Amino acid sequence: MIENPFYGRETQGEFKLYELGNLILESGETLRGARLAYRTFGKLNASKSNAILVTTWFSGTGKVMEDVYVGPGHALDPDRYFIVIVDQLGSGVSSSPQNTPAPQAMAKFPKLAIGDDVRAQRQMLTDLYGIERLALVIGGSMGGQQVYEWAVAYPMMVERAAPIAATARISLHQQVFIETLREAITSDPSWNAGWYTSGLAVREGMDRMARIVAILGWSAQFYQEERWRSVVGMSSLDDFINGVMKAYFEPMDPNVLLCEMHKWQRADVSRHTAGDLPRALGRVKAKTMVMPISHDSFFPPQECEADYRLLPDALFRVIESPEGHMGLNGFEPGYMEQVDRHLNELLAT
Amino acid sequence: MIENPFYGRETQGEFKLYELGNLILESGETLRGARLAYRTFGKLNASKSNAILVTTWFSGTGKVMEDVYVGPGHALDPDRYFIVIVDQLGSGVSSSPQNTPAPQAMAKFPKLAIGDDVRAQRQMLTDLYGIERLALVIGGSMGGQQVYEWAVAYPMMVERAAPIAATARISLHQQVFIETLREAITSDPSWNAGWYTSGLAVREGMDRMARIVAILGWSAQFYQEERWRSVVGMSSLDDFINGVMKAYFEPMDPNVLLCEMHKWQRADVSRHTAGDLPRALGRVKAKTMVMPISHDSFFPPQECEADYRLLPDALFRVIESPEGHMGLNGFEPGYMEQVDRHLNELLAT
């Protein structure tokens, strides 16, 4: 194990840990003594009909979902709903390469799948609260991949689903892209096949990865209009790459990011139906609000729209955000206003 | 010097070498014994009014321009025009890191600028043929950057200009992108600060670069529709990455690619006007056919259109090609048909 204060309560705020026990993974391996980090807001009503599950994205934790998406005034309002935010496995806060003891520590942490997260989350919600049906499952990016997995794997448990900036099956374009991120880290000699002495030792590879993320993470328009000035307050392109992109990833654990990439790169609900995506999405019972981001180069609107057309009962709302995928962080005032409006529309049905 | 058969006549076909002598560069350095590789087609008429200059792109040489763009049936028809294709400096065929002797060999090869190419090309055309005016300057990508440089630096010499898939000033988005390519090569320990024993020794870094090129070089749609099957005859994503992207770059010289990246990343006609792009493009006398590629992620159509709006006498024609930037290679039958049609329209004026 490697002590990394970034994943502790001082940075991540208050969270609780749910002991899953031994989680048998899709791969066949067992993650021993698995734990899910979660935080809740609001009260579960007597009929248990007001529960909302919020999932997390690549490199993100429950903290950003709490700060940006949940609270009075938002659609995810703790006065009305019982909101559970769960950190994905391998995120650094839930069971992850850097916080799991031998013999599953660091490079020996097992390979995970999005389906493992969803099974673990289901076990937790059933066990802790007896929740049998979720009023809404919502998440962005890899969080949205979990939303699709929920809706396909447990159709009777999901009343509404809101995947933001995500698709039900990873695109081949993103498979290539994620591989470049992986190679940026693993080509750093200090990565040492996952047995580095500290995350900071792998800074060179992490920095290279941060710059590659910047290529597709932000839109061409974001660069053309030099929006880093207004959006993140940076004074030049280098200032932005160093002060935002590299600084964002620097405190994180390289094996954590690699663990998440592995899941991200393979997310595919059609593995439930032997590769038949229309049949997989045809299973979904949830009323689904498909919400791409207008300038997203990870999950372009037209690819999200293709999923929407395969869903039995869905709405399609494009969130206008010239930032592109990174708009998910709610940098722009107009972003959450749109998300809340669309979620309120969905929750009213 | 490193012997690299890829840049020889067996691979590149017939070309001639023009001895520039000592070329004083924009940087202030002097490239000693500089040479331009070129090939000509057709005959210069008595009034010297039918000369067309064709430039080359990143990693490309005169060979691909000859094979794809020039010939009977094409707008660039040797029966009507005197066509000169010039390899850019640092391309591997013209003076380049791997073919220049000490003390300017390999890592000591000087940093070049697009402006150096254009001055060298002008010297050659004047010296060899007494050409004072070009009926057309045409090129794609970095070749298009040279076209813009010609039109701004020597407005009286350029009657018509056709930049394909290029902008007059490199975008900040591409600056970041090109940096990731540079880092992919230079982070390979075998690169050894440019003093590798052979290009193939740097294969790991070159392979990483090839995959990053694939992210933006081909469109999201190209991946979504698995167009590598029809366009380049590959059977899977890995087959495409290995058999097309990595195989394409493998025989090339790493310092050559780095030399070209340096130019590509800094191309900017507004350095003639203290950063004032409207004023720089306002100088252009050429009738200019601005031709972006519809799905291009390097030089998106809207960025090309912004240049078009600043040009005094220009036409704007988007080439439909779902491949994206790599469409430049003419994989699709419809590609050259469109280019020829637009060029014929331009040449008729």
Image: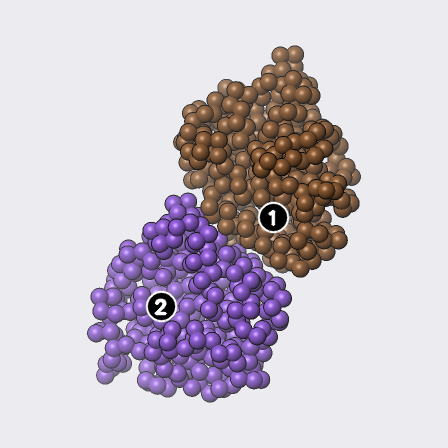
Chain colours: A brown, B purple
The residue indicated by pointer 1 is A230
Give, as a three-letter code, the residue at label 1: Ser
The residue indicated by pointer 2 is B64
- In this view, the residue in front, A174 or A12, is A174
SS state under label 2 = helix
Comparing labels 1 and 2, the label whose residue is closer to the camera: 2
- In this view, the residue in front, A171 or B19, is A171
**Chain bearing mark 1:** A
Q: Please report the residue visible at 40 percent of the width from the left and 84 percent of the height from the top.
A: B18
Q: Is residue B103 visible?
A: yes
Q: Please report the residue visible at 25 percent of the width from the left and 66 percent of the height from the top.
A: B74
Q: Is residue B309 visible?
A: no
Left or right: residue A347 compared with residue A84 = left
- Residue count near mark 1 (Cα–Cα under 10 Å), binned few <14, some 14–19, many ≥20: few
**From the viewer's perspective, is residue B258 above or below residue B322?**
below
Q: Please report the residue visible at 31 percent of the width from the left and 68 percent of the height from the top.
A: B67
Residue B338 found in image quarter: bottom left
- In this view, the residue in front, B170 or A57, is A57
Left or right: residue B290 compared with residue A96 = left
Q: How many marks?
A: 2
- In this view, the residue in front, A241 or B134, is A241
Q: CA distance from mark 1 to mark 2?
A: 43 Å
State the image coordinates of residue B177 (x, y, percent, origin top left): 53, 58
SS state under label 1 = helix
Give, as a three-letter code, the residue at label 2: Val
